[in-house]
Structures are given as structure tokens and as C-alpha cells.
Image (spheres, rainbow, N blue to C red):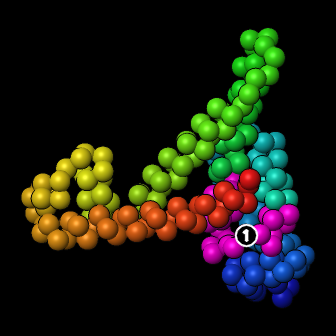
């Protein structure tokens, strides 16, 4: 077993930031299969999945000193999902243009649609990861539009408890979006 294989993700991320090539290799070897599985799950195409991973790892190395990675696994998984969505939209758009025999047009709208879809999926994933009671309260408030008092009555909890669940959900979302911003910054 190599020494770098024993290092924690946090230590490998710190070494990567300093330009340590062996740390980069250890990250690649630790995460390649998991990330490939994620990419393949979303795109169902081996070639696209491999291209996405190559892009992810090239960017990780190129922007190693510009990003602060708190959770290496989550950072890489989020990067893969975002890149797969971008790749799929680009491929679909190219196919549409070829089918229509049109000259390529601006893809700014496609990029915005990719970002919006990714953000929506990301937020839904964060909401799904909330504790059950917190998730139910948040969804009743944000998606059903119920007041705190209505939620409290419906769930037979105090309004104070309902507010606490809403505040906890919002704090979790804010923190997750802050971390996502760091991931997205690495791709611009």
C-alpha cells in the first residue's frame, strides 16, 4: 500500500492545492470508478462518461490552487453531474441543429437551461437529505405555501418547532449553495 492511499480526503485536497502530483494521482485512483459510475448513470454512454471524467480531472489539476475543497467526494460528484448535464445538452443541441440543417446558433440559452436544471436537481437533492420532519415542514411551507401556524396544526407540533425546522432547512440549503458556488467557480 502506498503512503498516499492512507491519507484522508482533506489531506489529499490540501496537498493537491500545493501542486502535489502524487496526491492528484491518489485522488484519481480513489475516485475514478465511483465518478465513472455516476457519469454513466446519468448519460448511459461509456464514451461520454470517460470524456466527462477526463475533463473533470484536467480541470481539477488546472484549478488546483484556485479552489477550496471542503468535501472532496461531494465536490467531484457534483462536478461530474454538472459536466454530464452540460455534455448532454450540447450533444442534443448539435443533433437538433444537424437535423434542422441550420448553422450553429448561440448556446447561451442552453447554458442557462443547463445551469437551471442542475441547480434545481441539486437543491432537490439537498432537500431530500434533510431529516424527515424538517423536510416535511420545509416542503409544506415552500411548495404548499402553508403558514407556520397551518403547518403546526397539520403536523400537531408547536409553531416554534415548525419555525425551527424551516430555519434549519434554510441554513442547510444556504451552506450547500455556498459549497456549490465553489464548485461552479472552478468550471468558469
Q: Position of residue 75 (x, y in %)?
A: 65, 65
User: Dot 1 surroundings within 10 Å: few (below 14), some, or many (20 or more)?
Assistant: some
Residue 10 visible in the picture: yes
The quarter of the displayed image where residue 93 is located: top right
Q: Is residue 94 magenta?
A: no
In the image, residue 71 above or below residue 78 = below
Q: Which residues are magenta?
A: 60-80
At a point 12% along the width and 59% down the height, the residue shown is 149
Which residue is at the front of the view, 9 or 181?
Answer: 181
The quarter of the displayed image where residue 91 is located: top right
Secondary structure of residue under mark 1: loop
Which residue is at the front of the view, 53 or 82?
Answer: 82
Residue 35 visible in the picture: no
Would you say 72 lies left or right of 138 here?
A: right
The quarter of the displayed image where residue 181 is located: bottom right
At a point 46% along the width and 59% down the height, the residue shown is 126
At a point 73% along the width and 55% down the height, the residue shown is 187
Toward the top, the furthest residue is 101
| Residue behind mark 1 | 67
Would you say 8 lies left or right of 54 here?
A: left
Q: Position of residue 137 (x, y in %)?
A: 25, 59
Quarter of the picture containing the N terminus is bottom right
Q: Is residue 63 magenta?
A: yes
In the image, residue 156 above or below residue 140 = below
Would you say 160 lies left or right of 4 here?
A: left
Amino acid at each position: 500500500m502506498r503512503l498516499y492511499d492512507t491519507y484522508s480526503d482533506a489531506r489529499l485536497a490540501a496537498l493537491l492545492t500545493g501542486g502535489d502530483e502524487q496526491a492528484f494521482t491518489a485522488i484519481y485512483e480513489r475516485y475514478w470508478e465511483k465518478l465513472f459510475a455516476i457519469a454513466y448513470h446519468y448519460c448511459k454512454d461509456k464514451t461520454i462518461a470517460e470524456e466527462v471524467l477526463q475533463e473533470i480531472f484536467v480541470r481539477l489539476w488546472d484549478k488546483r490552487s484556485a479552489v477550496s475543497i471542503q468535501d472532496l467526494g461531494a465536490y467531484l460528484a457534483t462536478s461530474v453531474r454538472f459536466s454530464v448535464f452540460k455534455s448532454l445538452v450540447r450533444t442534443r443541441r448539435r443533433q437538433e441543429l444537424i437535423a434542422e440543417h441550420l448553422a450553429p446558433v448561440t448556446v447561451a440559452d442552453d447554458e442557462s437551461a443547463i445551469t437551471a436544471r442542475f441547480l434545481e436537481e441539486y437543491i432537490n437533492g439537498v432537500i431530500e437529505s434533510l431529516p424527515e420532519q424538517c423536510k416535511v415542514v420545509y416542503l409544506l411551507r415552500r411548495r404548499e405555501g402553508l403558514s407556520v401556524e397551518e403547518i403546526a396544526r397539520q403536523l400537531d407540533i408547536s409553531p416554534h418547532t415548525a419555525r425551527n425546522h424551516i430555519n434549519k432547512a434554510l441554513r442547510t440549503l444556504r451552506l450547500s449553495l455556498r459549497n456549490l458556488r465553489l464548485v461552479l467557480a472552478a468550471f468558469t
